[in-house]
Image (cartoon, rainbow, N blue to C red):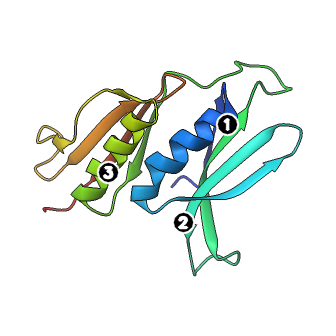
Amino acid sequence: MLDHMTFRVSDIAASKVFYTAALAPLGYTLLVEANYGSNLLGYGTLDANNPSGHKIDTWFIDGASPYGGHATTTGCHLCWSAPSRDAVDAFYAAALAHGGRDNGAPGLRPHYHPHYYGAFVIDLDGNNIEAVCHAPT
């Protein structure tokens, strides 16, 4: 099971606007905004079982790592679980309204399974992001 992931972005301010809007319908909020040598954003949900009271599983950091590698994470696929089909629709609409590009409108994807309802968007750095609801309605 994954605990968290970090993506490097080309413009932390633009990513903040984009991801704050796109992730809100999924129950995510910006929980950390800090600078530890680079600007970073931490998105997550409230979690009463966590000692901090929340769980941050998605991080965005500005610029290249001092240890090398690419300055921006690009070409990855990242999917968040949505609480409802309406939340998938709202994720998609918010992402497009804030600079994302369509990569698959909300709808059923029965080739995955009969209740797979997802939407795909290319984010500001070229990653394929998705929200999915597995519930039957």
Sequence-first tag of 1 and 2: 1
- How packed is label 1: few (under 14 Cα within 10 Å), some, or many (20 or more)? few
- Residue, x 42% and y 30% (percent of image)? 100
**Residue 137 — which label?**
none
Instruction: Tell me the element at label 1.
Output: helix
C-alpha distance separating marks 1 and 3: 22 Å
- Residue, x 45% and y 30% (percent of image)? 99
**Residue 13 — which label?**
1
Identify which amino acid the numbered label 1 is placed on.
Answer: Ala
Residue at the far front: name it. Answer: 97
Pointers 2 and 3 in contact (C-beta within 8 Å): no
Identify which amino acid the numbered label 3 is placed on.
Answer: Ala
Residue placed under numbered mark 3 in the picture: 90
Mark 1 against mark 2, which lies toward the viewer? 1
Examine the image and state in which quarter residue 135 appears: bottom left
In this rendering, the count of numbered labels is 3
Sequence-first tag of 1 and 3: 1
- How packed is label 3: few (under 14 Cα within 10 Å), some, or many (20 or more)? many
User: In the rendered view, does 126 fall on the left or right side of 58?
Assistant: left
Query: x, y percentage for residue 24?
Result: 46, 56
Residue placed under numbered mark 2 in the picture: 45
C-alpha distance separating marks 2 and 3: 17 Å
| Image quadrant occupied by the C terminus | bottom left
- Residue, x 33% and y 42% (percent of image)? 92
Up the image or down, 122 lies above or below 88; here it is above
Identify which amino acid the numbered label 2 is placed on.
Answer: Thr
Examine the image and state in which quarter residue 38 appears: top right
